[in-house]
Image (spheres, rainbow, N blue to C red):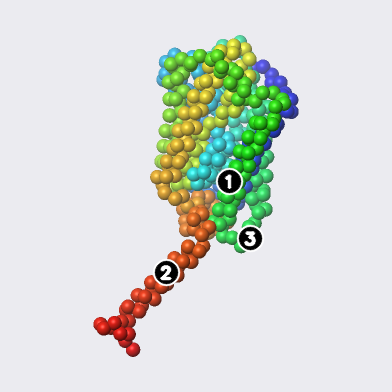
Amino acid sequence: MAPHESLPWWQLFSPADLPIAVIVLAIGFHTEAARIGAVLKDRQTRAAFCATLLTTLLIVPLIAISAVWIVPHVPPEGVIGILTVALLPGGPLANILAVAVGANSELNVTLTVAEMILSTALLPLGLLVVMPRVLGAEQVIRVPFSEMVHGIALVLGPMLTGVAASSLTRLEGLTAARRRVVKRRIFRLLLLLALLLAIAVRRLHTSGPPPLSAQLTELLRSAELPPDATLLAAPLFGVATVAWCCLLGWTMPAQPMPNRISICLEVGTRDLTIALVIALVGLPSLPAPQRAQVALAVLLAWATCNGGVALSGFLMCALSGPVCYADAGGGDGGGGGGARGADCEREEQEGEPDKLALRTSLLEGSGRKSDAEDGAGPTGATLV
C-alpha cells in the first residue's frame, strides 16, 4: 500500500463543507443530550445499538461478498465498487432520515459516531484483504485517511456543538413535547439555511481544486456501460441489504417503533463521498476507464441501498401510524428513548391550544345539556 500523502488544508476544509456542517449542527441541536446518555442504559435500546452495529460492520460486507459470489463473472472493478460501499456506513444521512420519519434520533446519532470511528479501521482492513486478491499484489492502493479523518471531524465537531447548544437551551415554561416541537422547527430552519449556503457556495466558490462532482463528471464523460454482471450484482447487494435491515428492524423483540425504524435506516444507509474518493484517487495504478467502472459500481450500489432504505423508512412510519416519541416516565431524562406514550410530538395539538380549549368547552356544554335532559319530566318541565 502506498503511503498516504497529506493533503493541503484547503482540500481538507473548504467553503463547500459549510452546508454539511450546518446540517450536522441541526441534527445535534435536535438531539436530547440526556437521551444520548440513556441509549446504552436502557436494555431495549442497548440491544438495538449492539445488533445494528454488528450488522453494519460485519453482516453488510458479508452480503456484498455473497452478491459478487452469486453473480458469475463480476469484473474486479465491480467487486471493488460494491465492497467499498458495503464497508462505509451512512453518516449524517441516516440521522436526517431519522428526524424526518420520527425515529429515535439519539440512537442514530450514537450509532453514527461509533460507526464512523470504527470504519477508519474496517475500511483499510477490507481493502488490504480484497484488493490484492482482485487486482493483484502489484496494485497500488491509497487509503484516504485524511478524507476519513476530515469526515469524522466534520461530523463530530458540529454535532457535539449542536448537542451542547441543545442542552444549554432550557426553553423554560414549556413541556417536554413542546420543547421538541420548537427544536424541530429550528432544525427545519437550519436545513433551509444549509440549502441556501450550498447554493451560494456553488455560485461563488471558484478557487481551489475542482469539487468531487466535477471530477466524477469528467471521469464518467467517456465511460462505457458496466458489464451485465456488475449491473446485476450491485442492485442485488442493495436489495439484499435493504431486505436484511427491514427484517432486523421488524423482528427484534420488545423494541418500540422508533427504534425499529432507526435500525432499518442505520443499517441500510451507505456513504458515498469516501467511496467516490477511493474510486477517483485511491487507485492511481488503474487506467481512467477502469476507475470509471469502479465509480459506476459505487453509484449503482449506493443508489439501490439508500433509495430502498429511505422508502422503507417512510413506509414503516406510515404503516405504524403516528410515532409517539415520549419520555419514559414523563421526564426529560427518560431512559426509554423512543417509547410510545401520551406525551406525543404532534405539532397540531401543541401548536393549536385554541382548538383544544374549544373542544373542551363543547364537551362541557354537552355534559350540562345531558344533565338538564336527565332532570326533565314527561312534559318537558323541570322537576323541583
Residue 148 vertical position relative to residue 227 in the rendered view, above or below = below
User: In this rendering, does residue 158 appear at all?
Assistant: yes
Location of residue 145 by image quarter: top right
Observer-nearest of 165 and 60: 165
Compare marks 3 and 2 and give the one earlier in the sequence: 3
Q: Nearer the viewer, mark 3 or mark 1?
A: 1
Q: Nearer the viewer, mark 3 or mark 2?
A: 2
| Amino acid under disc 1 | Arg
Q: How far apart in space, not on screen, are marks 2 and 1 (Cα)?
A: 35 Å
- Residue 23 x, y percent position in the rendering: 61, 40
Q: Which residue is mark 3?
A: 172
- Residue 143 x, y percent position in the rendering: 63, 22
Q: Which residue is mark 2?
A: 362
Location of residue 114 by image quarter: top right
Compare marks 2 and 1 and give the one earlier in the sequence: 1
- Give the SS element for disc 3: loop
| Amino acid under disc 3 | Glu
Q: Which residue is mark 1?
A: 188
Crowding around mark 3 (Cα neighbors within 10 Å: few <14, some 14 to 19, many 20+) is: few
- Give the SS element for disc 2: helix
- Give the SS element for disc 1: helix
